[in-house]
Amino acid sequence: MIDRIYMKEALMEAEKAYAKGEVPIGAVLVFGGKIIARAHNLKEERKDPTAHAEILAVKEAAASLHNWRLNGSSIYVTVEPCPMCAGALVQARVSTLIFGAWDSKAGAAGSLVNLTQFPQFNHRMEVYGGIMEDECKAIMQRFFEKRR
């Protein structure tokens, strides 16, 4: 039940991205039972290829905690992270990743590759995919249908 509450918050972030014409992906980072960071894609607005929701949320959380190590945190993302974002989550020592829609084209948490649990890395995280998958897929489908 708590996963749905946080995923709804991530979906609200995705709606903000959608309203700006950005690919509608949202993320919230939770530590100690509280949301300490929230973000959505801003690649177009910032003209920055690294301005993915996950990266922005990790940066905000690290600033909030005054620590780049986010051990004990969980991140909720509407779409399975790409390789860049999965790598950032590993580097930040995020403990748990919960995402909505699977991404068969660029997913790096189990669909295409799994960087979040790569055995040779010094950090691995728990991963739960498919949380509110229908809702998370729907906003992506709506966005890309509108662009066609």
Image (tube, helix red, strand yellow):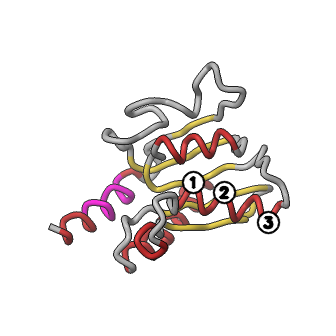
- Is 56 covered by the magenta stretch? no
Tag 1 residue: 76
Asked if the residue at tag 1 contacts the one at tag 3, i.e. Cβ–Cβ closer than 8 Å, the answer is no
Horizontal placement of 50 versus 21: left or right?
Answer: right
Q: Position of residue 86 (x, y in %)?
A: 55, 42
138 above or below 112? below
Packing grade of label 2 (10 A; few <14, some 14-19, many >=20) is many
Q: Identity of the amino acid at label 3?
A: Ser
Q: CA distance from mark 3 to mark 2?
A: 10 Å
Mark nearer the viewer, 3 or 1:
3
Going by the picture, which residue comes out furthest to the bottom? 19
Read off the magenta span. 134-141
Q: Residue at x 58, y 25 (%)?
A: 118
Circle 2 sits in a helix, a strand or a loop, which is it?
Answer: helix
Horizontal placement of 63 versus 27: left or right?
Answer: right
**Quadrant location of the C terminus?**
bottom left
Q: Identity of the amino acid at label 1?
A: Tyr
Circle 3 sits in a helix, a strand or a loop, which is it?
Answer: helix
Packing grade of label 1 (10 A; few <14, some 14-19, many >=20) is many
| Quadrant of the rendered image containing residue 65 | bottom right
Q: Please tell me which of labels 1 and 2 falls first in the chain.
A: 2
Q: Please tell me which of labels 3 and 1 falls first in the chain.
A: 3
Q: Please tell me which of labels 3 and 2 falls first in the chain.
A: 2
3 above or below 127? below
Going by the picture, which residue comes out furthest to the top? 120
Q: Residue at x 38, y 43 (%)?
A: 102
Q: Residue at x 36, y 65 (%)?
A: 23
Tag 3 residue: 64
Tag 2 residue: 58
